[in-house]
Amino acid sequence: ETRKAIEFYEQRIAIARALAGEPKIIMADEPTGNLDSQTSKDIMKLFDDLNKEGITIILVTHEQDVARYGKRLVQVKDGEIIYDGPMY
């Protein structure tokens, strides 16, 4: 339980640092990669809230459940874009 809380707050601190300069875009590479499923949901909720405030979130993930939070999906395979469009 303690480790879960630490990981969640570490991610929040990283996001807070990214927000310090009032960016219009946040790029997140595997932001939920080392987190349990509930903490991942909490982080994705935070990204969703930021997006609703007008911040564009560019997120890289290998996790389908995380990708489903997006509005647009760009799939890359072997260095080629194989899909670029709305989530399906």
Image (spheres, rainbow, N blue to C red):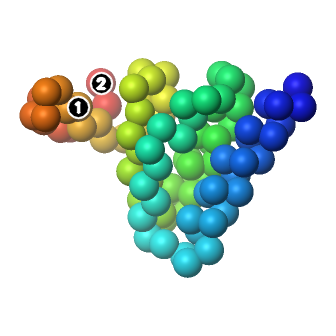
The residue furthest bottom is: 21
On the image, the x and y values in percent for residue 56 come to: 42, 59
In the picture, measured across the screen, residue 29 lies left or right of residue 31, that is: left
Task: List the residue tagged with mark 2.
Answer: 88
Using the rendered image of the protein, determine whether residue 83 is visible from the camera's viewpoint.
no
Q: Residue furthest right?
A: 2
Mark yes or no: residue 19 visible: yes
**In percent of the image, x 63 and y 66: which residue is there?**
17
Rendering quarter of residue 1: top right
Residue in view at x 62 percent, y 57 percent: 15
Q: Is residue 62 left or right of residue 7?
A: left
* Type of the residue with mark 1: Gln
Question: Could you tell me which quadrant the C terminus lies in?
Answer: top left
**47 up-or-down from 85: above or below:** below
Mark 2 neighbour class, 10 Å CA radius: few under 14, some 14 to 19, many 20 or more: few
**Contact (Cβ within 8 Å) of mark 1 with mark 2:** no
Residue 62 on image: x %, y %: 39, 26
79 sits to left or right of 33: left
Question: Mark 1 highlights which residue?
Answer: 75
